Amino acid sequence: MFSRLTASLSLPKRYELSNPRNDQKELVLIDNLFGSHRIRLYAWLSLASQILIVVTGGAVRLTGSGLGCPTWPECEPGSLVNVPEQGIHGVIEFGNRLLTFLLLFISLGTFITVMRLKKGNRQGLFWTSLGLGLGIVAQAVLGGITVLTGLNSWIVGAHFLVSMGLIVIATFLFWYSRGRRRLAHNKALSRLSLLMIPVTVAVIVIGVILTGSGPHAGDSDTPRNGLDSELWSHYHSYPAYLLLLLTVAQVALRWSITGPNSARFSLGLLAVLGSQAMLGLIQTWLGLPLILVGLHMLGASVLASLITYQALLNKAWLGIK
Ligand code: HEM
């Protein structure tokens, strides 16, 4: 009787005070998702997803699906998603567009986690996580311009280079999230590590120009940049060999300073760089088979990150404490 009376007097559900137990559950959930212990995971996911989208973008280009969705932001005039008539090219291009949302989701999670850290623990993390989020939006727009210009090879190249920039930012985020690790170094090692950066930029930029002259445009009707592929392939390989030499020198210097154990990172870098150069040569001899070109793009993305990381480990970035 009493309970029926109180039930009739109780407020409608929307006016009920929140249940403290539910609030507790929500807090636990938020802590699980965005607790400070998650920052390393988000940094990993940010880096991995930035590399992944270069590879899937490569798949779009190499399968000739660049205009699988002929317009942007709609996939087909009047439809945001791909339609059956667009076939497999539409599926591949639209799938790549969808991946942007995964990247945005990861970057939002990263940013929320960073903002929940104490102010003193956010050093470097705030700007890198914000930069990644804004960069993803800028890349989506540039991807749209790429489509709207009918895959102009210079715009496609710029789209690739912005991705390389985002990989560099994600590497900084990763380094900050791991407590800004440094290896013992001397001036020579720091300078050598710094010199490797412009050489890598040269290899990548010339590689992108070379691609603009090659056969994989992203669509069979797209014009190429008209440069001589053979000549530009030489221009591309010279700084690549110089980079290999500089890395051998880094291994030797690192070994002499701190012994074989801490030379492991430089040795790993040498292995990846050597494989990338071999891959470059083999793909040229075999007439640029799709799989090898895709692997070469993956190698370039991983190297953009490793070269950034080695510079941070060897304290080559001036002004960053
Ligand atoms: C070792 C460091 C190297 C790096 C970091 C590197 C990086 C790159 C990059 C970023 C691209 C442009 C990818 C794109 O725009 O989609 C590219 C293209 C290319 N690279 Fe390399 N590369 C290296 C070594 C080499 C070597 C030694 C060769 C042999 C000549 C080579 C042959 C090529 C060719 C032929 C292309 C054009 C592929 C196409 O037309 O699709 N690469 N490389």
Image (tube, grey):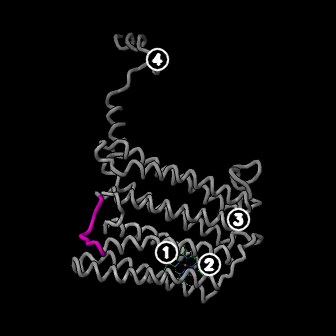
Give the structural element (helix, strand or loop) at label 4. Answer: loop
Task: Locate residue 312, reporting x and y percent.
Answer: 34, 65
Q: What is the spatial separation of the Cα atoms under label 2 and label 3, in whole angstroms? A: 20 Å
Residue 257 rendering spot, x and y as whole percentages = 23, 78
Return the x and y of residue 59 as percentages of the image width and height. 61, 69
The answer to which image quadrant residue 189 occupies is bottom left
**Residue 125 relative to residue 285: left or right:** left
Residue that lies at the very extreme toward the bottom in this rendered image: 285
Residue under label 1: 299
Name the quadrant where ligand 1 sits.
Answer: bottom right
Q: Nearer the viewer, residue 173 or 191?
A: 191
Mark 2 lies on a secondary structure that is helix
- Dominant secondary structure, magenta: loop
Q: Residue tagged by mark 4?
A: 12
User: Which residue in the structure is indicated by mark 2?
Assistant: 290
Q: Quadrant of the C terminus?
A: bottom left
Q: Does 184 lie within the magenta span?
A: yes
Eye-nearest disc, 1 or 4:
1
Looking at numbered disc 2 in the image, what kind of residue is underneath it? Leu
- The crowding category of the residue bearing disc 4, from other C-alpha atoms within 10 Å (few below 14, some 14 to 19, many at least 20), is few
Report how far apart the C-alphas of labels 3 and 4 lie in the structure: 61 Å
Q: Is residue 41 above or below residue 235?
A: above
Amino acid at the residue labelled 4: Pro
* Magenta-colored span: 180-188
Task: Identify the residue under disc 3.
Answer: 152
Q: Residue at x 62, y 77 (%)?
A: 210
User: What separation in Å lies between label 4 and label 2 (alpha carbons)?
Assistant: 63 Å
Q: Secondary structure at mark 3?
A: loop
Residue shown at 36% from the left, 10% from the top: 1
Tag 2–tag 3 contact (CB < 8 Å): no
- Asked whether 23 falls inside the magenta stretch, the response is no
Which numbered circle lies on residue 256?
A: none
